[in-house]
Amino acid sequence: MEIERKFLIKEREKKYPSPFNVEELKKNIKKYGRNLTQYYLPLDLLKIVSDEFDFKLKFKPNEFRIRKLGNKYSRCVRSKGKIKRSEFERSITREEFKTLIEFKEKTI
C-alpha cells in the first residue's frame, strides 16, 4: 500500500506558502539529486509480463510503468486511488528495461 503525499507550492504568489525552504530544496536537488526516467506501458502488456515473470496481483491494475533511477531498473503496477493505492514494484535487469521500453505510451 502506498500513501501519496502531494504539496502545492506557488512560490511567487505566496497563496500556498511552502512548509519548506524552497531555495534550500533547489540546492539539495542539484547536489544530491539523481536522474529518474519513467515510462508508462499499456495495461494489455501487463498480462504478458505477469505470465512471463510469474507474479499475481491482488488488486485491479490501473497503471503499469518502468523506471530507471541511476543504474537501477524497476517495474511497477499501481491500482487506482488519490491518497491510498496498492502498488507492486520489483527490480528488473537493464536488458528487461530495454525490451519493455519499446512498448512505452508516454514518458515522464
Image (cartoon, grey):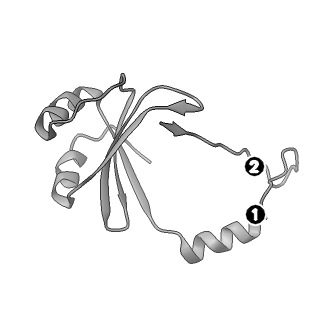
The residue identified by callout 2 is 9
Expressed as whole percent of the image width and height from the top left, the position of residue 38 reads 39, 50
Q: In the displayed orientation, state which residue is furthest to the left.
A: 52
Do the numbered discs 2 and 1 sit on residues whose CB atoms are within 8 Å? yes
Q: In the displayed orientation, state which residue is furthest to the right.
A: 14
Q: Residue 22 bears which disc, if any?
A: 1
The residues bearing labels 2 and 1 have C-alpha atoms spaced at a distance of: 9 Å
Q: Quadrant of residue 56?
A: top left
Expressed as whole percent of the image width and height from the top left, the position of residue 74 reads 31, 52
Asked whether, in this view, residue 58 is left or right of residue 2, the answer is left
Expressed as whole percent of the image width and height from the top left, the position of residue 105 reads 33, 37
Asked whether, in this view, residue 66 is left or right of residue 12, the answer is left
Q: Quadrant of residue 29?
A: bottom right
Q: Quadrant of residue 40?
A: top left
**Taking 29 as reference, is 50 above or below it?**
above
12, 6: nearer the viewer:
6
**Taking 87 as reference, is 14 above or below it?**
below
The amino acid pointed to by label 2 is Ile
Mark earlier in primary sequence (2, 1): 2
Q: In the displayed orientation, state which residue is furthest to the top.
A: 60
Element on which disc 2 rests: loop
Q: How many marks?
A: 2
Element on which disc 1 rests: helix
The amino acid pointed to by label 1 is Val
Residue at screen point 58% across, 29% down: 82
107, 29: nearer the viewer:
29
